[in-house]
């Protein structure tokens, strides 16, 4: 019996009704895998994860590649099992939130620009339930990756009392309490497949997963926009990182098969379809993180603000290269260079969004290389390892499947993002990793991702299995 026949028989015998919007469009199942109460179903080239619940199948997360779906399920199972092991009862809610990769539009979210990120098929998953001791005034979190436990106060405090990763959790809980939510003491276990310190927004994913978990625990739903902003505030006030809005927005609003062109003034998202399966997004982690990242980020932000004030304008969107040139004597060399990056990057992002929508991969690639050069020379947030990754990708070239490459995220280490022809993704990946290690003596790592769905609850109560 084929996997398909087996699965189909199984579904029919359980009298399961498929009501996902996707399936309504196409009922020809081509393959499937059964993981207890979980099913991975493949329809033509797409794959969906379903979960059985009272005789129906709930479409859960729409991951589009088998390894990503398997990884998601394994992570969820690990987190739930760990919860039961640590706390001795079953979690009430399980929440997931993805990391992100930014295709282009770097360091312009806090400069009134446009960014073009997508959520990635890597998630932070949190299992939680109200604690059996209601007089407790804190939440107990256990990180299954760090094998560390932390008690986080449930209060409306305006700054951190916790250290390390506890600050993100504390900031989000404080945000909920400050807006009047009644947060009960609770226990939680966290697991993550988003690489930490890789510029893929592992901290935003942690904040957003915490917020979604709190929605499940308290029954109080936030507007998605409010949720993203509450999480950004947690990062500002509790982690001391003056980030823009891109990371939290991506983790909240991510959608399969779509890039998000986010207008960082109006905070509106224009969808840029990205369905072409012949093109893949390859994310390569340099596996280095230089310590100066947070300090330099704040410094760049200050330089951009002082340059704009000197120009006498309210928004970088109103600045042209000619304005910068006219003001060059009044600006410091660093301010001038930062301004040049911001102005050109805003233009490149809009051009890239159009090129993406039209499938003009060579043009997207050129814009990615220019973005990298601008971040390297003008904004000065790249590093030798990232430059090496991008150079190797460029040397491989379009004939061998690479359209373009650039550093992604805050910089000073972390990842590069490379657009590759899907059929060449494997050899390109192998060559980048091999050459990178030969040249730097550092072992990189990489994976591809389709645009993934944003944060969601994967389990709502003890009866949903
Ligand atoms: C970090 C910040 C984002 C953004 C990027 C650079 O990831 O959190 O807000 O500024 O750097 O584009």
Image (cartoon, rainbow, N blue to C red):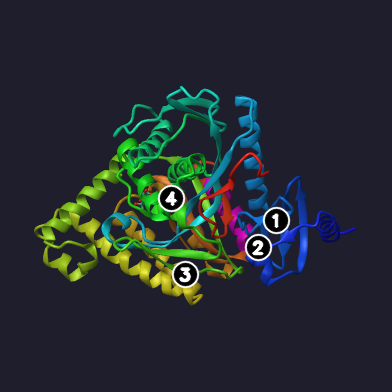
Residue beneath disc 1: 57
Tag 2–tag 1 contact (CB < 8 Å): yes
Residue at the far right: name it: 1
Nearest the viewer among 61 and 272 is: 61
**Rendered residue at 38%/72% (across/down):** 351
Foreground tag (4 vs 3): 3
Tag 4, which secondary structure?
Answer: helix
Which sits earlier in the primary sequence, circle 1 or circle 4? 1
Question: In whole angstroms, how far apart are the C-alphas of marks 4 and 2?
Answer: 41 Å
**Rendered residue at 51%/75% (across/down):** 359
Question: In whole angstroms, how far apart are the C-alphas of marks 2 and 1?
Answer: 8 Å
Nearest the viewer among 402 and 34 is: 34
Tag 1, which secondary structure?
Answer: strand
Question: In whole angstroms, how far apart are the C-alphas of marks 1 and 3?
Answer: 29 Å
Foreground tag (3 vs 2): 2
Give residue 150's mark: none
Which sits earlier in the primary sequence, circle 4 or circle 2? 2
Q: How many marks?
A: 4
x and y, in percent, of residue 249 in the image: 41, 54
Q: Tell me which segment is drawn in magenta.
A: 424-438
Give residue 272's mark: 3
Foreground tag (1 vs 3): 1
Asked if residue 413 is positioned above or below residue 395 in the image, the reply reads above
Nearest the viewer among 19 and 396 is: 19
Residue 444 appears in the figure: no
Asked if residue 222 is positioned above or below residue 174 in the image, the reply reads below
Give the class, few, some or many, for how many residues have Cα within 10 Å of label 4's Cα (few <14, many ≥20): many
x and y, in percent, of residue 303 in the image: 20, 50
Q: Is mark 4 within 8 Å of ligand 1?
A: no
């Amino acid at each position: 019996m084929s996997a398909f026949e087996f699965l189909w028989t199984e579904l029919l015998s359980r009298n399961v009704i498929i009501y996902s919007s996707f399936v309504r469009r196409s009922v020809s199942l081509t393959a499937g895998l059964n993981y207890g109460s979980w099913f991975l179903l493949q329809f033509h080239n797409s794959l969906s994860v379903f979960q059985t619940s009272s005789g129906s199948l709930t479409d859960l997360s729409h991951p589009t590649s088998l390894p990503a779906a398997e990884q998601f399920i394994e992570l969820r199972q690990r987190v739930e099992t760990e919860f039961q092991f640590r706390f001795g009862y079953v979690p009430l809610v399980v929440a997931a939130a993805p990391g992100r990769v930014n295709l282009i539009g770097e360091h312009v979210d806090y400069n009134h620009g446009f960014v073009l990120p997508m959520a990635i098929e890597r998630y932070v998953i949190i299992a939680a339930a109200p604690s059996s001791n209601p007089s407790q005034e804190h939440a107990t979190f256990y990180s299954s990756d760090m094998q560390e436990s932390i008690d986080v106060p449930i209060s409306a405090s305006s700054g951190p009392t916790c250290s390390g990763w506890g600050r993100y959790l504390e900031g989000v809980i404080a945000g909920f309490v400050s807006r009047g939510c009644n947060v009960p003491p609770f226990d939680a276990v966290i697991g993550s497949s988003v690489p930490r310190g890789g510029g893929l927004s592992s901290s935003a994913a942690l904040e957003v997963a915490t917020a979604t978990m709190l929605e499940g625990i308290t029954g109080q739903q936030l507007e998605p926009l409010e949720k993203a902003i509450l999480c950004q505030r947690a990062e500002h006030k509790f982690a001391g990182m003056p980030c823009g809005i891109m990371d939290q927005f991506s983790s909240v609003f991510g959608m399969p098969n779509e890039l998000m062109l986010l207008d960082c003034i109006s905070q509106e998202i224009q969808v840029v379809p990205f369905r072409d399966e012949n093109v893949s997004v390859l994310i390569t982690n340099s596996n280095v993180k230089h310590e100066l990242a947070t300090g330099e980020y704040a410094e760049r932000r200050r330089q951009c603000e002082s340059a704009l004030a000197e120009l006498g304008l309210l928004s970088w969107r109103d600045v042209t290269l000619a304005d910068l040139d006219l003001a060059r004597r009044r600006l410091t060399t660093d301010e001038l260079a930062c301004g040049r990056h911001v102005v050109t990057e805003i233009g490149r992002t809009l051009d890239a969004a159009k090129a993406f929508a039209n499938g003009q991969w060579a043009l997207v690639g050129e814009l990615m290389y220019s973005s990298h050069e601008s971040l390297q020379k003008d904004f000065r947030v790249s590093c030798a390892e990232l430059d090496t990754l991008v150079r190797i990708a460029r040397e491989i070239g379009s004939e061998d499947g690479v359209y373009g490459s650039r550093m992604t995220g805050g910089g000073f280490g972390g990842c590069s993002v490379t657009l590759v022809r899907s059929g060449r993704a494997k050899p390109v990946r192998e060559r980048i990793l091999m050459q990178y290690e030969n040249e730097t003596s550092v072992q990189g790592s990489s994976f591809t991702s389709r645009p993934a769905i944003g944060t969601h609850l994967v389990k709502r109560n003890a009866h949903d299995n």
